[in-house]
Image (tube, rainbow, N blue to C red):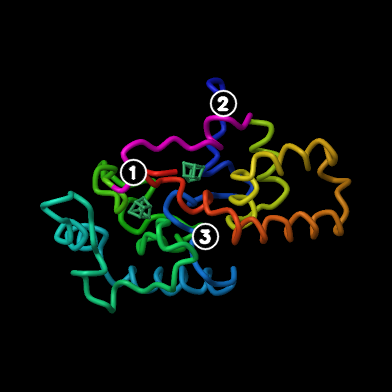
Amino acid sequence: MNDTGTINPCRPGFGASCALCCGSHNYDASREEIESLFQKRREMFRLFSSDYLLKQLRASRSNLTGSYYPDRTIDNGIIITMPKLYDDGLQCPFVCLLDDDTPGCAIYPAHGEDDRRFDCFQNYTCKYFSCASKDILTDEEILYAARLFHDWYYYTLFIHSIDILRKFRLSHPILEKIEESALSALKQLLDASLRSEKNLHTITSYFT
Ligand code: SF4
Ligand code: SF4
């Protein structure tokens, strides 16, 4: 476990970010289609205050299980989504592009004034959640990934494919010397993982 890390893998800088535990990649869709969805949500959520969205989310909570079911109670016009890649994987309808074009939470913004962690959509979906990337990767590995991709899409897949990351870094230790063909092959590998590695999409599940 990385107890000495100081870099936050969720937002490490260099234009990279992660929202995998909010289900950012669990769509049976291309990157462009997912980004377009996040953009549409951003425009939609701008019409509402986060307080209003939170109220709606709370109203969808089951008294029996404690889980939230926003798609059952919130106006269809507010919840816009696409089919899941894995049905038992998380896909939160409140992930959208934030102002800096980084995917993030419409309800629980990073710099909110009050603490809304206990109103997260995925409360009760998972009892225990520990992020392997956060726990295992070193600061150097996280920064290597961030500086390689500068994005949310491949950066996320890379830091959650720890074996692939470590192997690639070992064979390409100097970022500036990485050839386009090697980067392209890496992206293809990560694209394949996105579809074949169910664990990427169920990291917050009870049963994985
Ligand atoms: S999956 Fe891990 S690195 Fe990604 S946003 Fe969640 S806690 Fe952060
Ligand atoms: S409510 Fe916000 S923090 Fe919780 S899963 Fe959805 S987008 Fe992520």
Q: Which quadrant would the N terminus be assigned to in this image? A: top right
Is 9 rendered above or below residue 190? Answer: above
2 or 3: tag closer to the N-terminus: 2
Q: Is mark 3 within 8 Å of ligand 1?
A: no
2 or 1: tag closer to the N-terminus: 2
Would you identify the image quadrant in which residue 53 lies? bottom left
Q: CA distance from mark 2 to mark 3?
A: 25 Å
Q: Which residue is mark 2?
A: 5
Residue at 17%, 61% in the rendered image: 60
93 displayed left or right of 60? right
Q: Which mark is residue 25?
A: 3
Single out the mark in the foreground, 3 or 1: 1
Single out the mark in the foreground, 2 or 1: 1
Q: Are marks 3 and 1 in contact (CB under 8 Å)?
A: no
Q: Is residue 154 magenta?
A: no
Q: Position of residue 181 (x, y in %)?
A: 87, 59
Magenta segment: 125-138
Q: Nearer the viewer, residue 33 or 208?
A: 208
Q: Amino acid at mark 1?
A: Cys
Q: Which residue is mark 1?
A: 126
3 or 1: tag closer to the N-terminus: 3
Would you identify the image quadrant in which residue 127 lies? top left
Q: CA distance from mark 2 to mark 1?
A: 25 Å
Residue at 45%, 67% in the rendered image: 84
Describe the element under mark 1 as helix, strand or loop: loop
Q: Position of residue 202 (x, y in %)?
A: 45, 50
Badge 2 density bin: few <14, some 14–19, many ≥20, Cα 10 Å:
some
For the stretch drawn in magenta, what is the main secondary structure?
A: loop
